[in-house]
Amino acid sequence: MIRLRKPLEYYHQKYGSYSWALHKLYLLMEKQHNRGQEGAGLGVVKLHAVPGYEYIFRERALGPNAISEIFTNIGEKLEKENINSLSPEVAESYTPFLGEIYMGHLRYSTTGKSGISYVHPFLRRNNWRSRNLLMCGNFNMTNVDDIFKDIVGTGQHPRFFSDTIVLLEQIGAELDKENHRQYRKFRDVLPNPALNEAIESNMDMEAVLKASAPTWDGGFVICGATGSGEMFALRDSGGIRPAYYYCDDEVIVVASERPVIQTVFNVRRIQVDELKPGSAIIVDRAGNFKVSDILGEKKNEKCSFERIYFSRGSDADIYRERKELGRQLVPDIMKAIDNDLENSVFSFIPNTAEVAFIGMMDGLEKELNREKTDKILELSASGLLDSDKIKEIISQKLRIEKVAIKDIKLRTFIAEGSSRNDLAAHVYDVTYGIINNDKDNLVVIDDSIVRGTTLKQSILSMLDRLHPKRIVIVSSSPQVRYPDWYGIDMSRMTEFIAFRAAVELLKDRGEEKLLDDVYHACRKQLILPPEEQINEVKRIYAQFTDEEISDKIAQMLKPEGTKAEVKLVYQTLDGLHRAIPNHCGDWYFSGDYPTPGGVRMVNRAYVNFYEGNPMKR
């Protein structure tokens, strides 16, 4: 979101364009395109429109090119207005998509629902400006059914059932109440239109949020703007979803990631603040802002998976953390290759794992230097050390290669069935001649292994064509074992190769009865209030070591006909916490959910798995 703090004419004079904020919003959205490729939306609030003319504008589109599409459409409309020649009065009062508040959103579906009606921002309309609400967010709620029942119980009739619509109507109802409160405050002392002006100037968004947000169970950053000019962004009390903001005398900016604000507005890292968990940045109609404690800050549950996978690695802290994730893996990698660095080749797939790869190689370099030191000391003690031996030892290097190149020309969606699988196996091209046949270990790092589909259908078969003795796939994240309901789309038990592996291990050992026991235990838990429930699914994983599950995953993912031995090395939970100490939310890996709704949902997810209803909530 962007809030201009000066008249449009100021930006026209200083930066040469009335649409300066639109250009900035475009850059913010493009640089966060990694956060959602399914669709995009944009909203603008115009504070000085005259009656009879629109003052809230919205443009939305579907597909990976949605950002370009919406800004092209807006650009064509502004071109017709010939905006560079407009007077300040016309620009501020009449011209579409030129305003003081700008909101942009990139859609990444966490519900499985699609279509333009699900693309943010959402808009609640009213003839009074202060009752209009434009809203978007990065969130998912675990108790949307309860919130829906509450608002229906007040007499409302939402047109769709989605967490976004439910929150829009809930906040909107509180916005109506705040309007009524201000009306009652001023009705006996002010005539219209002064009465309406007083209502708009005194709206208390802090009160609106405090009346709405305490009922929410989930991870969220909820952003909103009213038609009369109030703006807010509220973060959940555990800090599950990220939010950053920057303010100066010209502009207020809010975004999901720090580096995009740094780059787009050319400011230093220290000038960009993280929005405190449980707090909201609130901007009033005049452009004054404050950060208010709405929900209180609770236990640190900032999402670690966000740091491993979702956010851009250009953030200084995230870059260091991903390198450290790679370094933490070194002891287990050395074990997987039998401490044989000389006959091991190291690489990474995909490019998002490159930073963890750098950290991994830093750690392996230290191991190699330790080996060199030990050899030199050993030879020196035996009297066999000479200059040739020293040169031979210090010339040893780690073997780093680019083993795979993605062939972007292949489009697997055009084929079905076995033809599609055959195409998927050739999405990557390999670099031949870098592996000693049947002698070398080939170690490849990925940022995460969740479903394992790409490994089985493409990567392992591709790497086997290089004829290594052993393929070691390394994950910079721990085993993803549990679903998520806080804004990242991993909600069904069967999606996780770690869960499927644990189930297969139980069957291998003749212990399937535990699956029945956990089912009945989950059913009993679901009768209890969410805050009293425990995660019964943990009992399944408790039967096995991490290594046993990793070995079973490797067995399940190894394609038929693969000649090389396949091993998997996952990050440990301890390694994760050492690498990312300030983001403690690890429920994907540990099953320790940050809210009662998460525990309820994991028990529900297991019941759905057992009963064969994976999509049911």
Image (cartoon, rainbow, N blue to C red):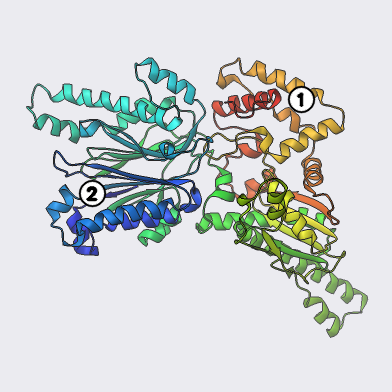
Rendered residue at 82%/35% (across/down): 505
For residue 99, side relative to residue 191 (left or right): right
Q: Does residue 268 appear in this view?
A: no
Note whether 289 is above or below 341 in the view shown. Answer: above
For residue 203, side relative to residue 474 (left or right): left
Q: Which mark is residue 96?
A: 2
Q: Quadrant of residue 175?
A: top left
For residue 169, side relative to residue 56 (left or right): right
Tell me the distance, in whole angstroms, between the alpha carbons under discs 1 and 2: 59 Å
- Count numbered badges in the picture: 2
* Mark 1 touches mark 2? (CB < 8 Å): no
Residue 178, position as x, y percentages in the image: 25, 26
Residue 457, position as x, y percentages in the image: 72, 50
Amino acid type assigned to the residue bearing label 2 in the image: Pro
For residue 38, side relative to residue 45 (left or right): right
Residue 40, position as x, y percentages in the image: 42, 47
Closer to us: 237 or 89: 89
Identify the residue position indicated by label 1 in the image. 515
Closer to us: 79 or 84: 79
10 Å crowding of disc 2: few (<14), some (14-19), many (20+) = many
Note whether 168 is above or below 34 in the view shown. Answer: above
Closer to us: 66 or 272: 66
**SS type, badge 1:** helix
Rendered residue at 52%/34% (across/down): 111
Note whether 120 is above or below 172 in the view shown. Answer: below
Amino acid type assigned to the residue bearing label 1 in the image: Leu
